[in-house]
Image (cartoon, rainbow, N blue to C red):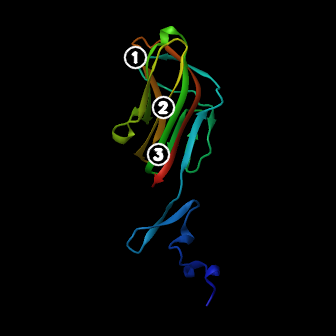
Amino acid sequence: MAEHNVLTGSSLHEPKDIAAAASNQLYFADGAGSGDMELAVAYGGIGLFNHAGSAVSGIGTTPIALAVFTADMPAADVVPAHGSDNITITTAGDYAVHFYASFATSGAGDAGDYQFRLRVGGVEGSGAQNLGCHREMSGTSDEGSVSFAGIATFSAADVLSIYVESDDGGNNDDIDLLDVTFFVTLLKA
């Protein structure tokens, strides 16, 4: 009989289905004496780093995509795309979502309430996908930060992005983004 560590093919038996497992998969027991090979980890994000500063103009009650990202973060089984300011989910599951931004208003006329919201396929989510945050700014070139985090279920091929809006009905508010991070981490496929 061969030593356990040199078994191959149909003799390979621990863990179940290991010979057919894809890279980055682990065996997850189902509690009933069996289990399946599943994706072990997926993560990725986009950012604007080092107080890079990026102006966003024309903010108001009509939400606009936050198009300031300049770098992709490391990723595994998630597609970060700073060039198109989004993250694409490749494996359906429950994900932790994190967003952080520090920003400054450009002038006194930019006072008001700013909202940053998660969108899925360009549409504001509902239920657990309805993530966002608010920040009231005085408009006197003040600086502040906003962040949100949550857990939401996404489908394969969902495209996640961040939109910004303010309470200016004329869509004339301007801000300068200093540091921004937006990333997701798979919790359960």
Name the spot of residue 50 as percent of width and height, x first. Answer: 66, 30
Left or right: where 13 falls relative to 121: right
Q: Is residue 34 above or below residue 83?
A: below
Q: Residue at x 53, y 78 (%)?
A: 13
- The residue pinned by badge 2 equals 162
Which sits earlier in the primary sequence, circle 1 or circle 3? 3
| Between marks 3 and 2 in the image, the one whose residue lies nearer the viewer | 3
- Label 3 neighbour load within 10 Å: few <14, some 14-19, many 20+: some
Q: Is residue 103 above or below residue 37?
A: above
* Residue 84: quarter of image: top right
Name the spot of residue 23 as percent of width and height, x first. Answer: 59, 61
Looking at the picture, which amino acid does disc 1 mark?
A: Asp
Q: Is residue 41 visible?
A: yes
Looking at the picture, which amino acid does disc 2 mark?
A: Ile
Looking at the picture, which amino acid does disc 3 mark?
A: Ala
Mark 3 element type: strand
Residue 167 badge:
1
Q: Is residue 81 visible?
A: no
Mark 2 element type: strand
Which sits earlier in the primary sequence, circle 2 or circle 1? 2
Which sits earlier in the primary sequence, circle 3 or circle 2? 3
| Between marks 2 and 1 in the image, the one whose residue lies nearer the viewer | 1
- Total numbered badges shown on the rendered structure: 3
Q: Residue at x 54, y 76 (%)?
A: 14
Alpha-carbon span between mark 2 and mark 1: 17 Å
- The residue pinned by badge 3 equals 96
Mark 1 element type: loop
Asked if labels 2 and 3 touch by Cβ distance under 8 angstroms, the answer is no
Name the spot of residue 60 as percent of width and height, x first. Answer: 43, 17
Q: Is residue 141 above or below residue 79?
A: above
Give whichever of 72, 182 is nearer the camera.
182
